[in-house]
Amino acid sequence: MVKKTGKPGNSTRAKALVSMAQQASEKYLDEIDVDMGDGYTLVYEKPSEASMNYAFEITKHNMQELYEQAPEWGWYDDEKMKEIKSAKQHTLFVHHEGQRRGICCLRWLTENNEPVLYLYEIQLEASACRFGLGTKIMTLVEKLAMKSRMQKVVLTVLINNVAAVEFYRKLNYTNNEKLDKTYSYRILSKKIKPDGDVELKYQA
Ligand SMILES: CC(C)(COP(=O)(O)OP(=O)(O)OC[C@H]1O[C@@H](n2cnc3c(N)ncnc32)[C@H](O)[C@@H]1OP(=O)(O)O)[C@@H](O)C(=O)NCCC(=O)NCCS
């Protein structure tokens, strides 16, 4: 799905930055502790059977119908579970009163020869939507990209996911590359200014 273009000269530097970020990922992730207000927190949990099953179920619940409406996508349980359990993917959890209420899945990778933090999922339960939690989670994602010296946050959104398209546009995400109009998704991104000193533990 990802088209590899960009300047070849940047490739080695981008790969080196991503490799450094991946090596330091546990350190960054363990530092994350965001008090999002009203009893909601955002933290990193190491993968477990229970946490991965939760991540799968909330994604399936929120996305299956939208995926199935997209001609070149479709929903496949095995593929999604494999993606969620991949060692390359890191999952943050929204907690509220001792329960999980949402997830945010991330990978450090190169995209078009740029070092990026790729948002694979942001999923909230319906009861947690429209309180500003999504916006607060994206602020943390952008700070994590700054801290790990990535150039962009990149994500894929289905055009039929009207709420998500609206959400990312409001947060100033724009098309990362020109895709044929017939595609049922867009790749969006936002440029990030690296800042190794940014705090990942704070009250939002
Ligand atoms: C998309 C999602 C993460 C947004 O999180 P959220 O906490 O509900 O969003 P926020 O409250 O921070 O909203 C910020 C802005 O996004 C836009 N927005 C969010 N939800 C919207 C909706 N359902 N309809 C239209 N605009 C919406 C609005 O502009 C909103 O600003 P406003 O509240 O001042 O109008 C959340 O709705 C969600 O998990 N949805 C289901 C899963 C999903 O689609 N994930 C994205 C996959 S790419």
Image (cartoon, rainbow, N blue to C red):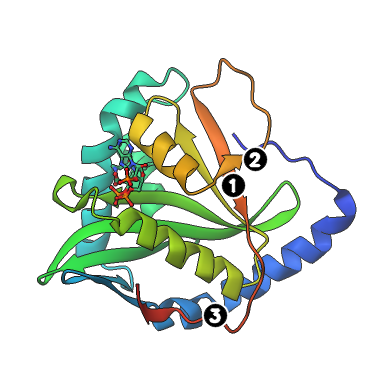
First in sequence: mark 2 or mark 1? Answer: 2
Q: Residues within 10 Å of mark 2 (few under 14, many from 20)?
A: some
Q: Circle 2 is placed at which residue position?
A: 176
Q: Amino acid at mark 1?
A: Ser
Relative depth, front residue between 148 and 56: 148
Q: Circle 3 is placed at which residue position?
A: 198
Q: Amino acid at mark 2?
A: Asn
Classify the position of the N terminus by image quarter.
top right
SS at mark 3?
loop
Classify the position of the C terminus by image quarter.
bottom left
Q: Disc 1 versus disc 3: distance between alpha carbons?
A: 20 Å
Q: Amino acid at mark 3?
A: Val
| Residue 86: x %, y % from top left | 44, 57
Point out the frontmost of discs 3 and 2: 3
Relative depth, front residue between 114 and 126: 126
Q: Is mark 1 within 8 Å of ligand 1?
A: no
Q: Circle 1 is placed at which residue position?
A: 189
What residue appears at the point 27 percent right and 54 percent down from the top-left corner?
Answer: 55
